[in-house]
């Protein structure tokens, strides 16, 4: 029997100086805007769509769609990725839980000239850290006076991310 425990988020007691609530729809629009200039790190794999799905329990799952251009093989594939959010050193961090689950594909994985699962896991890590969380952290901190605030808590609901900031 395997029991999955929720990620413990260490939070300081006390009231925040600022609380920011960000809607899932806003995060999806912001991700779509940044996606056009985003590189997966591999020329043969392009991110073509991205949808965030906030869930209770510090979860921000994502559903990226990739186009693979591998010479004889050109196809689109999607992935479902479970992520957990946490606060570390005054910033939001995201951790992938498990491996991305690939959608149905017309091409067998063993026929491809690369490790598609590993390549997509690497691309998802870049999406999480270079596209999503870095942008959210930079926007939150710069919106409230730069380095005068630090993030110390968060919560998620079905369509909302709430971040608590405290003045340093």
Image: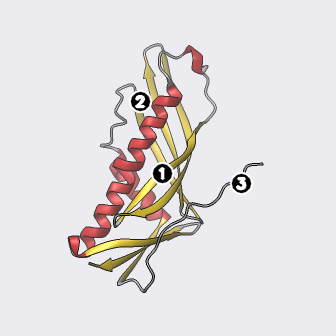
**Label 3 belongs to which residue?**
3
Separation of marks 1 and 2 at Cα, in angstroms: 22 Å
**Label 2 belongs to which residue?**
45
State which quarter of the image contains the C terminus. bottom left
Callout 1: SS: strand
Label 1 Cα neighbours within 10 Å, binned few <14 / some 14-19 / many ≥20: some
At 58% from the left and 17% from the top, the residue drawn is: 110
At 49% from the left and 17% from the top, the residue drawn is: 73
Q: Position of residue 18 (x, y in %)?
A: 36, 81
Q: Is residue 149 left or right of residue 3?
A: left
Q: Position of residue 77 (x, y in %)?
A: 54, 33
**Taking 161 as reference, is 29 above or below it?**
above
Q: Is residue 52 left or right of residue 17?
A: right
Callout 2: SS: strand
Is there a contact, CB below 8 Å, between mark 3 and mark 1?
no
At 48% from the left and 63% from the top, the residue drawn is: 25
Is there a contact, CB below 8 Å, between mark 3 and mark 2?
no
Label 3 Cα neighbours within 10 Å, binned few <14 / some 14-19 / many ≥20: few
**Taking 135 as reference, is 104 above or below it?**
above
Q: Position of residue 79 (x, y in %)?
A: 55, 39
Q: Tell me the mark number nearer the camera, choosing from 3 and 2.
A: 3
**Label 1 belongs to which residue?**
95
Q: Earlier in the sequence, mark 3 or mark 2?
A: 3
**Taking 39 as reference, is 8 above or below it?**
below
Can residue 75 be seen in this snapshot?
Answer: no
Q: Nearer the viewer, residue 18 or 21?
A: 18
Q: Earlier in the sequence, mark 1 or mark 2?
A: 2
**Taking 63 as reference, is 162 above or below it?**
below
Q: Earlier in the sequence, mark 3 or mark 1?
A: 3
């Amino acid at each position: 029997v395997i029991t999955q425990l929720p990620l413990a988020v260490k939070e300081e007691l006390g009231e925040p100086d600022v609380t920011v609530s960000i809607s899932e729809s806003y995060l999806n629009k912001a991700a779509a805007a940044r996606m056009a200039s985003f590189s997966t790190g591999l020329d043969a794999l392009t991110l073509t769509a991205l949808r965030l799905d906030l869930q209770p329990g510090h979860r921000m799952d994502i559903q990226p769609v990739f186009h693979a251009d591998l010479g004889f093989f050109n196809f689109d594939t999607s992935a479902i990725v479970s992520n957990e959010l946490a606060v570390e050193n005054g910033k939001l961090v995201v951790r992938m839980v498990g491996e991305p689950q690939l959608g149905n594909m017309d091409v067998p994985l063993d026929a491809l000239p690369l490790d598609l699962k590993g390549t997509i896991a690497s691309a998802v890590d870049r999406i999480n850290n270079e596209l999503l969380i870095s942008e959210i952290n930079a926007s939150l901190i710069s919106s409230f006076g730069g380095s005068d605030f630090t993030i110390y808590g968060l919560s998620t609901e079905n369509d909302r991310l709430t971040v608590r900031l405290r003045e340093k």
